[in-house]
Image (cartoon, grey):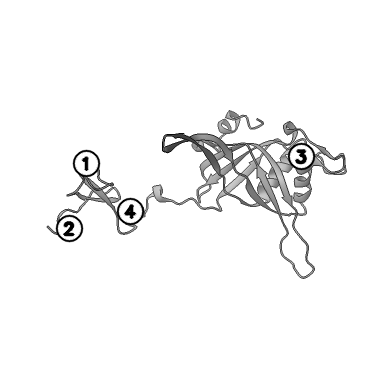
Amino acid sequence: MAYNEYKQDFGDGYYWRTNLNSTKDPYSHDGKYALKKLGAYHMIGNDDYEPQRNNNFEIHIFGLGNLYYVGTNTNVSETEAENCLTLSAVSVGALSQEITPIEVPYGNTKVKFAGLPSVGNSEIVYTDYIGKNTERIINAWHTLVFNPATEKIGRASEYKKPAILIETAPDGSCSRVWHLKGCWPSTVNYGGYDYNGGAVRQINLTLTYDIMIPLTDENESGSEAFWNKYEWNK
């Protein structure tokens, strides 16, 4: 029998046809198997297939009200610091989490179980805006971790900050939110200088954090209820 005699379009993005050898087919399901559509027509006008763009995001770091410009007694405004580190951001590296497997042997074989999780670091690139004091604000935060003038390492309660990474749709509406806990700058590269250049100076910061949690209230992310619900200072 010809192939097309088995073929049916159920309008759900798949073609289904009778599987004559379902006991051997790993993709069999109730005696049938799925063939993906051969074109992209099912994506036309369908918001379910709107792709997430990697340039539609915002990162917000909270609790920066205890920063002082290095070498001065001038306190950095918390709002100024947060806005600066949001609006100066160029890119944020991928969030990642790894769970180390534990191997348990028995006889001639081993099985694996979930071990301790570890969260990766994310590289953030900032544009160094002179008027926004980008470099000085990052330096003030980094000094809470280690102060080269006093040679003291700070307390985690002082330098660890909460943050959220917001992913948006092309129209600016929120699509997803990540809550990052225990954020601090473990490495800061302030960028080089070059008389032959004229490029925009950028600062590279390694953001280290302890926990990454996907939030579920994406539909409320722009509302006051959303911002009040979570304790961003913890």
Identify the residue shown where x is 74% and y is 67%.
198
User: Of tags 4 and 2, which is closer to the observer?
Assistant: 2
Disc number lying in front (1 or 2): 1
Residue highlighted by disc 3: 145
Disc 4 and disc 3: Cα gap in Å?
Answer: 52 Å
Q: Mark 2 highlights which residue? A: 4
Q: CA distance from mark 1 to mark 2?
A: 20 Å
- Which of discs 4 and 3 lies nearer the camera? The answer is 3
Mark identifier at residue 30: 1
In the image, taking residue 139 as reference, residue 83 lies left or right, namely left
Amino acid identity at mark 3: Val
- From the image, tell me which residue sits under label 4: 42
Are there few (<14), some (14-19), or many (20+) residues within 10 Å of tag 4?
few
Q: Please report the residue visible at 55 percent of the width from the left and 36 percent of the height from the top.
A: 117
Circle 1 packing at 10 Å, graded few (<14), some (14-19), many (20+), is: few
Percent coordinates x, y for residue 215 in the rendering: 53, 35
Disc with the residue nearer the chain's start (4 vs 1): 1
Q: Are marks 3 and 1 in contact (CB under 8 Å)?
A: no
